[in-house]
Amino acid sequence: MTEIVATTPGLYPLPDWAKEQLKDQKGNQKEDLISGDEGAEIQDSYEEVRTEFIDAQQAASLDLVVEGQGRWDDMLAHPLAVNDAVDTRGIVRYYDNNNFYRDPVVTGDLEATGDIAEELEAASQQVENLQAVLPGPYSLADLATDEHYGDEAAFQAAIAEFLAEEAELLPDVETLFLLEPSLVENAPGDGADERASEAIDTVAGATDADVVVHPYWGALEEKVYAHVMDADIDALGFDLISDHEQNVYNAQEYGAPDDVALGIVDGQNTLVEEPETIEERIEWFTDQTQQNDYERIYATTNTETFYLPVNRFEEKLEALGALNKTEVKA
Amino acid sequence: MTREQFRPDDHDNDHFLLTTVVGSYPKPKWLHRARDLYEDDDHDFDEENFEEAKDDASRLITKEHERCGLDVVVDGEMRRNEMVEYFAHRIDGYEFNGPVKVWGHNYFDKPSVVEEVEYDEEWLISEYEFTSDVADTPVKVPITGPYTLASWSFDEVYDDEEQLAYELAELVNEEIEGLVEAGARYIQIDEPALATTPDDHAIVGECLERIADNVPDDVRLGLHVCYGDYSRIYPEMLEFPVEEFDLELCNGNYEQLDVFKDEEFTKDLALGVVDVHVREPEPVEEIKENIKKGLEVVPPERLTISPDCGLKLLPRDVAYGKMENMVQAAREVEAELDAGEIDIEAPTVSADD
């Protein structure tokens, strides 16, 4: 019997009151964004945001709860944006979206800050079934600029080590989602694909939690897929919203881990899926890949959810939480 | 060529470098205050009051543009809150659910298409009529293009963005017909989204075909594309059925200028000669050098002088200073051209091709 686990990859939209309040408290220029040393007033605001995020997930009956990453002004680049060895410079485009983040330029030896561990510590006071979210090492290196390590391979390895150190500092969590959109959006070529897989190993090895590598905005190229399958991870993600055909092909052709994460709710569109639709999408995937026997399926949005207005975001959480797991013939 | 109709009667020089703006301009502080009062339920500042405030602002900025000496003016888009929201509010089929993040604590009320889009009330016709009544100079109408309206919306209805863009192109076409009927002779379609997804240039081209179809020959149709990797849309964009391209090149120190030299620039170039991200007016001499960069690409009779992009995020006195210097620089370059003091490097194109 396949276990269905309703969850999300985090990076939630701030509640509308917090959008206003934090803009007033911090300002809205690039030098006003999160640097990791915010004062008590701003910390209190984020504490309230965190509580609201957790309440919303619990109200929606999600099986795994994320901290929500309200502080991640720079989206997946956040772990570097708060690091002393990094200069945040110009505003650059976030993948193929009408969103922007500060270019994190690494200028010295990277060391863990414990910034994310602190967020999760705070969340763990409220909730037990906690899921951590980090950028995958390949994506974080892709989002950043290196002015210190010198070559791509060394930089990739340093980013992986840095994330592994951050992961070691995390409190006990059930799962760790490593978000790897760059594996699709800027796919690694020969050699780099193997290094990306090794980098994932480095991070995955630093935690006892189940590690889910979640690429999105399409499907992995076949060779990249094969390399990621070699990594010592517990689950791999498939974005069935943006490209269900190629994702199914990969799982058919190369097999899949026992656990998979299925992006079956659109994190970037306001149209809210019915729970039945979500169930059908899960069944469709398992039907198409019957050669694989899944132990666990994480049912999730395909992407982060900060793209959505708050009302539709909450409705999507509810739809995921309302999945009738015993009905899904997976 | 539609350019000559915009040459002022009292223009001093033989050469004429048409000066204009992209569109948006800083709103007077009191207009923001008026909006706050209007949106405050506890206050009796009603719609009529707010409309009057917008009329006043439109009048003020139109005249401010004329004082700068611009040949073609805009009202600074005083009635528009944002370049997608404003239109989505007027199109049937859209709904609003709340703000979404653009970056940091900057948000945008990104609308959702929840039913088939249909033309309902007019978008810009009354804005144009008001502005042209106020203005002594010709008025340009900037209008957000269908591709940007589609890309910057959530789409719950159509199969893909391309289909939504084509549906919206029909509505933009209808609005432009109304504008032309009202007397508008200079219309600029804004497609900032093309800068972010240049591979979609064919979709933008197809949208423009639908729009340009019924536009009379004496109407000047331009396309504004913000800063991006222009090499990915050039020279393909020359096929678009518009007469003028308004490009943001000052911001990148004209590093991309060569892109437009490799293959002859066969349309009019509206060249950005002041940077909207620099918070002080560039000196006249510097702007003159920028204008001369344009003459490396097109001859003077095909060169329009404009800021890089909308000026709305600048302090108002800085925006004014930039426009004033820009016009002065253009007039000085014209005089130098008249005197034969400037070598024109651009390939000459016969006027009737």
Image (tube, coloured by chain):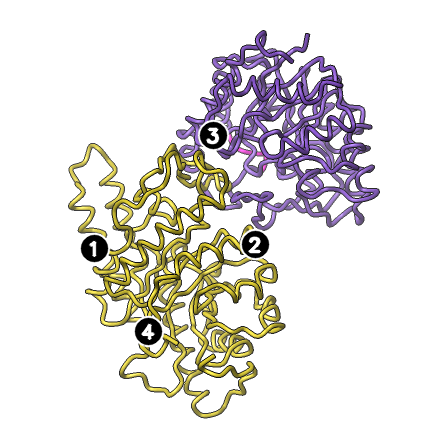
Q: Looking at numbered disc 3 in the image, what kind of residue is underneath it?
A: Leu
Q: Earlier in the sequence, mark 1 or mark 2?
A: 1
User: Is B129 on the left-hand or right-hand side of A71?
Assistant: left
Q: Give the vertical position of A246 relative to B240 (above or below).
A: above
Magenta-highlighted residues: A35-39
Chain B's colour?
yellow
The alpha-carbon separation of the residues under discs 1 and 2 comes to: 37 Å
Residue A12 % position (x, y): 52, 28
Residue shown at 56% from the left, 54% from the top: B198
* Neighbours of disc 4 within 10 Å: few (<14), some (14-19), many (20+): many
Q: In which quadrant will I find the N terminus of chain B?
A: bottom left
Q: Which residue is mark 4?
A: B71
Residue A38 falls inside the magenta stretch:
yes
Residue B142 % position (x, y): 36, 59
**Closer to viewer: mark 3 or mark 2:** 2
Label 2 chain ID: B
Q: Looking at numbered disc 2 in the image, what kind of residue is underneath it?
A: Pro
Q: Which residue is mark 2?
A: B198
**Closer to viewer: mark 4 or mark 2:** 2
Q: Which residue is mark 1?
A: B55
Q: Earlier in the sequence, mark 4 or mark 1?
A: 1
The alpha-carbon separation of the residues under discs 3 and 2 comes to: 31 Å
The alpha-carbon separation of the residues under discs 3 and 4 comes to: 45 Å
Tell whether label 1 touches label 4 (CB within 8 Å). Answer: no
Q: Earlier in the sequence, mark 4 or mark 2?
A: 4
Label 3 chain ID: A
Q: Looking at numbered disc 4 in the image, what kind of residue is underneath it?
A: Asp
